[in-house]
Image: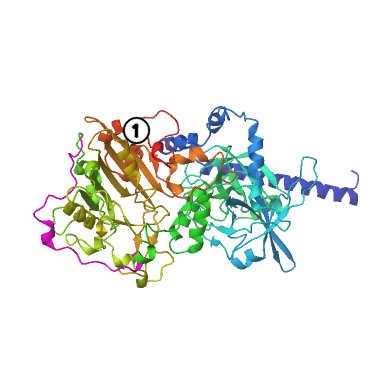
Amino acid sequence: MAKLRKSDSGERRRDISVLENAVGLAQRLQTERNWLSDSVALGVNRERDDKRYAIRKTLIGNDSSDPNGFERVIGESDLLSINFFDKGKAAAAAVCRIVVPEPGGEWYGTGFMVGPRLLLTNHHVLGSAAEADQATAEFGYEHDADAALRQPQRYKLAPSEIFFTDSGLDVTFVAVVPLSDNSVPIERYGRLPLIPLSGKALHGEHVTIIQHPGGKPKQIAIRASQIIEFKKDARIPGLDTERFIHYTTDTEPGSSGAPVLNDQWQVVALHHKAVPAPPPEIDDSGKKPAKRAAKPPAEELAEEEPVWIANEGVRVSAIYRLLHSRRLTDANALAAVERIERAFGMPSTNPAPFGNQQDQATEADGKALSESSWTGAAFGYDPDFLTTALPLKTVLARNTKKAAPLKDGVSIVLDYLHFSSVIHRERKFAMITAVNIHGEKLGHPGKRAGVWRRDIRIDDEFQPAGNFYETRLAADPVQFSRGHLVRRVDPCWGTEEEVKLAEKHTFHYTNAAPQVQRYNDVDWGNLEDYLLDKAQTKEKRLTVFTGPMFRSSDPEYGHEREGGPWQIPVSFWKIAVLQKTDETIAAAGFVVGQVEFLRPLYGSRVFTALTPTPTPKSVAPHPVPIRSIEDQTGFNFSVLRAFDAVGGLEATRQVRIVAKPDDIVI
């Protein structure tokens, strides 16, 4: 037998090492496949996914622009419209490299524009205003069609303008200066708006990520991965499927802060980390097993290096919930929300008054009307005011149990002249008001003479008053003015005495709502006037139901105030029922509020939102199907569905902005 030469021995050792590494790699890949097969949910939750599919379909666009869009979602086609790449190029323009200097060098991350001069990235990329103040956002750092590396446009960040960060969710919003070092406007690069609807990507759907891996020029992992859903019992440390979404896209350090996108180039998530499999030292019980025998080098290597089984991104809906939970206590959160909504062409949502906010903020409460003021007169909303009866008891439905009781221990309805109000037991504000308007008998009460007061018939705890509104009582970042749910002029009809009394009744806190967005009584209040103009009957009768949309995610306000904190509704609804002819009624539903709650609008806005959208001068009400208001509030307006002017339309777009009377369909 020939002797083994030294060189042969070295080559043999190298061969063995290569073989062992290959075995180790194969074992790691097999471990990854095993973890995925054991931990990923293969089935679907039909009830949940049917809703997601319905929303997902509305976000795809029409067949003429993307004929195979929905087929790709459900896995029946891989065909893409050629404009996929044009849209992708526009989306990629909004993605930048973030460069942060540090002693001896610099670190990198990815970010993208989500609103006018508003950048989104991870907290672990920009964790403080001081870091952001030294950082630079570089746009256009990429290779062109000839493989030449473009010189990026560099923009300084403006944390003194907006800086909001949260380590738990790993998100940071920061303002960007208007012009680059070379005076190029930041608006040139567009934006990727954040759509809060759940359903932008479904289990098994392909996603794309645009990134600066390792701080290198911009790259893309295009439709190379899929959304995965881990089983609830998957033994993955820190797994949180409510706030985070998981996918298999390839990323590297430097990719943190990149957008994860669906086939319509809509942001599904903010990429932030890779997900490792549980360490092999931990068994199903969470305990360390007995010490095992030594293993070959390849197996030891496989155990030393973590097995990455997926990537994780922050859900857009979770980002919205975070911002709105802080918007009344953190001025930067409020500013970020405003800019995000402006990306959809919505106006500022900062609190603003109907009239003079300073006057209302310092206004003292009036004395409650006496018990005798509420006897001997026929007060309250009239359910038979129109030819179709609309009993308030029927409308309340299951919400009856949520109503605050009156002091008599029996009633829940507060009756005033020509209108009524029902207070929410937990939220302390009116859940619904109902008013009858007689257009032919209306009398204008003149210059405001009313003063806000509490109602003696219900406990004070159910009617926030000066303790909520007056600025001198606490130093809150946001101040609210008192807003009428029933307009002060709506119930003012009949004799001159009745007109004055009805106006006085509207100035009860049981008819008040804190104003949390910039809409005023020109846009919202004149809706009744628009509708009365459309009435074909001589008497011009109109019944209007109004209320807030209470949600568990509504932000809190007034922690330092007596009786606080309160959760503040951030959107409101209105249903108007018009006596259109002598025998026929017509109905229409409207919503006014922030863009995150105007869900039907997204279908008409998301495809043009990569470029700046003109912002209207003020928030206008949006017609919506009455059924959608029922679904969100729990009230029962089933008797009106057959008369719903919007719900009966067969166009796919049932929602539009009301800017003038002719825009109202009823």
| Quadrant position of residue 250 | top right
- Residue placed most toward the observer, 645 or 303: 645
Q: Is residue 432 left or right of residue 300?
A: left
Q: Is residue 382 magenta?
A: yes
Q: Is residue 628 above or below residue 619?
A: above
Q: Position of residue 655 (x, y in %)?
A: 42, 37
Q: Left or right: 272 with respect to 220?
A: left
What residue sits right under mark 1 in the picture? Answer: 645
Which residue: 60% across, 60% down?
A: 124
Colouring style: rainbow
Residue at point 59% right, 66% down?
129
Q: Residue furthest left?
A: 376
Q: Quadrant of the C terminus?
A: top left
Q: x, y percentage for residue 418? A: 19, 48
Q: Give amino acid for label 1.
A: Ala
Visible residue check, residue 415: no
In the displayed structure, would residue 478 be above or below residue 240? Answer: below
Q: Residues within 10 Å of mark 1 (few under 14, many from 20)?
A: many
Depth check: 316 or 169 in front? Answer: 316
Magenta stretch secondary structure, dominant: loop
The magenta stretch spans residue 612: no
Magenta-drawn segment: 360-386
